[in-house]
Amino acid sequence: MAKLQILDHPLIQHKLSLIRQKDKGAKEFRELVEEIAMLMAYEVTRHLPLKEVEIETPVTTATTKMLEGKKLAVVAILRAGLGMVNGFVKLIPAARVGHIGLYRDPDTLEPVEYFSKLPQDVPEREIILIDPMLATGGSASAAISLLKNKGARLIKLVVLVAAPEGVERIQKDHPDIEIYTAALDQGLNDHAYIVPGLGDAGDRFFGTK
Ligand SMILES: O=P(O)(O)OC[C@H]1O[C@H](OP(=O)(O)OP(=O)(O)O)[C@H](O)[C@@H]1O
Ligand SMILES: O=c1cc[nH]c(=O)[nH]1
Ligand SMILES: [Mg+2]
């Protein structure tokens, strides 16, 4: 079953509480989402393999550790996932960045795909799929299916806020995926918005409402 990890670092929790507040404007919302994404990137890259390297410090030569150079791709689900990209690539500058355009139809709640541009060598890369919100799980599940159809084998899903319904959906559709979230909220309301959640992440980030 897909493993769920809640990233409960105090800085992540503090900043998440700030962006949940309805009076936060787009500027503050954007800055905080980027900061939280960076902190989450730190947590989800703990497993990256290291290799020993010989270096020269100003004092002596030494054997120290550097990243082995595992191939990574950060894939954002548009639009709201864009808000997390900078935080990730600041910490992992060598990562390739892919985009999957999906919106949730407000009536059917089904994801509608409108764009996809991914690195060519997706099968050789570990994929970090990012989207702030995991509500019904329909959008993330569709994005994971698309990535798997392109040959992706190792995918981690990283979200800011998850609903139990979305987690269950991913665990059912894609039991091989690891899910990382900053919070597991109570559930969904009648419009399938996460409660308490933070509202519509894309609209708040881009100021479109
Ligand atoms: O788990 P689900 O029920 O599928 O809902 C989650 C999706 O909804 C939001 O995107 P939205 O459709 O609002 O598109 P946007 O990012 O362009 O605003 C969010 O960013 C997720 O992609
Ligand atoms: O609460 C939610 C649910 C779906 N999409 C959002 O942006 N927020
Ligand atoms: Mg939206």
Image (tube, rainbow, N blue to C red):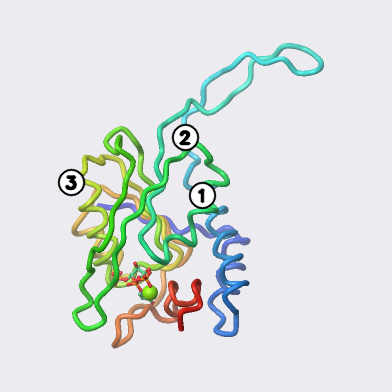
Residue 121 percent across, percent down from the top left: 30, 35
Seen from the viewer's position, the closer of residues 4 and 112 is 112
- Measured along the vertical axis of the image, is residue 129 above or below residue 66? below
How many marks the image carries: the answer is 3
> Dot 2 surroundings within 10 Å: few (below 14), some, or many (20 or more)?
few
**Label number found at residue 48:** 2
Q: CA distance from mark 2 to mark 1?
A: 14 Å
Seen from the viewer's position, the closer of residues 145 and 96 is 96
**Label number found at residue 88:** 1
Marks 2 and 1, the one that precedes in the sequence: 2
- Measured along the vertical axis of the image, is residue 154 above or below residue 70? below
Type of amino acid at the residue the image marks with label 2: Leu
Residue at position x 52%, y 46% from top? 89
Residue 208 percent across, percent down from the top left: 46, 79
Marks 3 and 2, the one that precedes in the sequence: 2
Q: CA distance from mark 3 to mark 1?
A: 24 Å
Seen from the viewer's position, the closer of residues 124 and 64 is 124
Type of amino acid at the residue the image marks with label 1: Phe
Q: Which residue is mark 3?
A: 149
Residue 150 percent across, percent down from the top left: 21, 43
**Label number found at residue 39:** none
Instruction: State which quadrant residue 203 falls in.
Output: bottom left
Secondary-structure class at tag 3: helix
Type of amino acid at the residue the image marks with label 3: Asn
